[in-house]
Image (spheres, coloured by chain):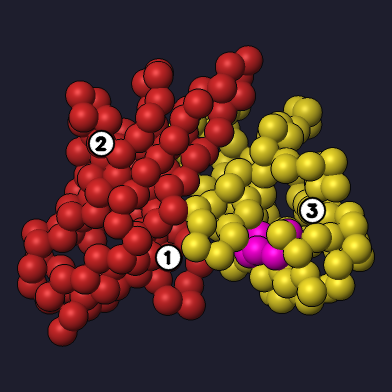
Amino acid sequence: GAGVSQSPSNKVTEKGKDVELRCDPISGHTALYWYRQRLGQGLEFLIYFQGNSAPDKSGLPSDRFSAERTGESVSTLTIQRTQQEDSAVYLCASSFGTSGSWVGETQYFGPGTRLLVL
Amino acid sequence: AQRVTQPEKLLSVFKGAPVELKCNYSYSGSPELFWYVQYSRQRLQLLLRHISRESIKGFTADLNKGETSFHLKKPFAQEEDSAMYYCALSGHLGAGSYQLTFGKGTKLSVIP
């Protein structure tokens, strides 16, 4: 059906509060990725889920960041005790994941969630 | 470590002029390289990848391992090419783990 969807599209929060961002991947895509894009910066890889394998969390910037995925569907990215430097656009992408790795796979991106921490 | 450098934040060209968006990478192994594009008010999407050796919307990109470059080219720019372009590299981190590293992007503006 539709492409990758993310909610909310915009989120304004106060420093110190927790936020939860949601991603619905394309149906049938087993691989799911989270990225962060700060103003004027490139996309920064955060975390990667592939099927039932342990996620690759190598890009998470601190232990305040965590992500979960329910089977091969919805994923939530949680940021605890938000800081102003967490302000960014958070992008989710998914891919078929058929190769078992994501080398060479086309990633389909969602519209992003714009997070502003005051 | 893997790194992608796009030296130009903004590139302005006249309609009909040739376009070259530069991308250089740093990676010790054999890389997979991509160009992603984001048009105004649209989501980021794949434009092309080097393993396909394809031409999309008139754009081509050749991987030059000697110069560690993957520049995006189009002989005649069109107004609809105005967008943000990101070069990306997929590299092996070891133990079956890969990472997609993006450059900071180049905003292409095609002047009518």
- Circle 1 crowding by C-alpha within 10 Å: few under 14, some 14–19, many from 20: some
Mark 1 vs mark 2: which is more N-terminal?
1
Chain seen in red: B
Question: Magenta residues?
Answer: A86-90
Q: Is residue A3 visible?
A: no
Whole-angstrom CA distance, mark 1 to mark 3, is: 23 Å
Viewer-proximal residue among A91 and A32 = A91
Chain seen in yellow: A
Q: Which residue is mark 2?
A: B69
* Residue A34 in the image: above or below residue B43: above
Query: Measured from the top left, where is residue A76 in percent x and y?
Result: 81, 54
Say whether residue B33 is left or right of residue B60.
right
In which quadrant is the N terminus of chain A drawn? bottom right
Q: Residue at x 83, y 55 (%)?
A: A79
Query: Measured from the top left, where is residue B34 in percent x and y?
Result: 37, 43
Q: Residue at x 47, y 30 (%)?
A: B2
Report the amino acid beneath label 1.
Gln
Say whether residue A19 is left or right of residue B5.
right
Query: Measured from the top left, where is residue A19 in percent x and y?
Result: 86, 63
Q: Which residue is mark 3?
A: A77
Q: Is residue A93 visible?
A: yes
Q: Which residue is mark 1?
A: B38
